[in-house]
Image (cartoon, helix red, strand yellow):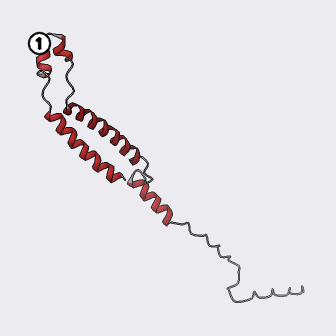
Amino acid sequence: MYTFLLILVILDSLVLVAAVLLQAGQGGGLAASFGGASSTDAFVGGRQAATILTKASWWSGGIFLFLCLLLQLMSSRVTQPRSIVEQQLRDQQTQQAPAPLAPLPLQNAAPSGTTPAAPAPPTPAR
């Protein structure tokens, strides 16, 4: 879906560029407005007839903004980590499980597999 909308935005941008570049100028731009043409119509611009190119540029501009908004909303809902460092930390945490602690050997304990010897009887006092 994302790729389809991206292709539509690219096609719409091509139509928008063509519609804007094919339109005729509206009286020389800012240089004519401030340079010598002092009428209000030259600065603000008079009411022009809506041609097919004007309508095409308005519609394609609106569609372009709408599609870009949709693409931005779709791309902001990514569940991936935002940086490589976060991804590496998550990988390390899942791979390294804490090792169980082994009990410490007792110094007076008998070796495994043998029974402890009975204590020697007390010697009689003389």
Crowding at dot 1, Cα within 10 Å, few <14 / some 14-19 / many 20+, comes out as some
Look at 12% across and 21% down and name the residue there: 27
112 or 55: nearer the eye?
Answer: 55
84 or 116: nearer the eye?
Answer: 84
Q: Could you tell me the amino acid type at mark 1?
A: Ala
Q: Measuring from the top left, give residue 24's x and y in whole percent.
A: 12, 28
- Residue 52 drawn above or below residue 71: above
- How many numbered circles are shown? 1
Look at 33% across and 49% down and name the residue there: 5
* Residue designated by label 1: 37
State the SS at label 1. Answer: loop
Q: Measuring from the top left, give residue 59's x and y in whole percent.
A: 28, 35
Look at 28% across and 45% down and name the residue there: 9
What is the quadrant of residue 116 in the picture? Answer: bottom right
Relative side of 72 to 57, left or right:
right
Q: Measuring from the top left, give residue 41's x and y in whole percent.
A: 18, 14
What is the quadrant of residue 31 in the picture? Answer: top left
10 or 113: nearer the eye?
Answer: 10
What is the quadrant of residue 72 in the picture? Answer: top left
Look at 36% across and 40% down and name the residue there: 69
103 or 34: nearer the eye?
Answer: 34
Image quarter hosting the C terminus: bottom right
Q: Measuring from the top left, give residue 83's x and y in whole percent.
A: 39, 52
- Residue 22 drawn above or below residue 98: above
- Residue 30 drawn above or below residue 11: above
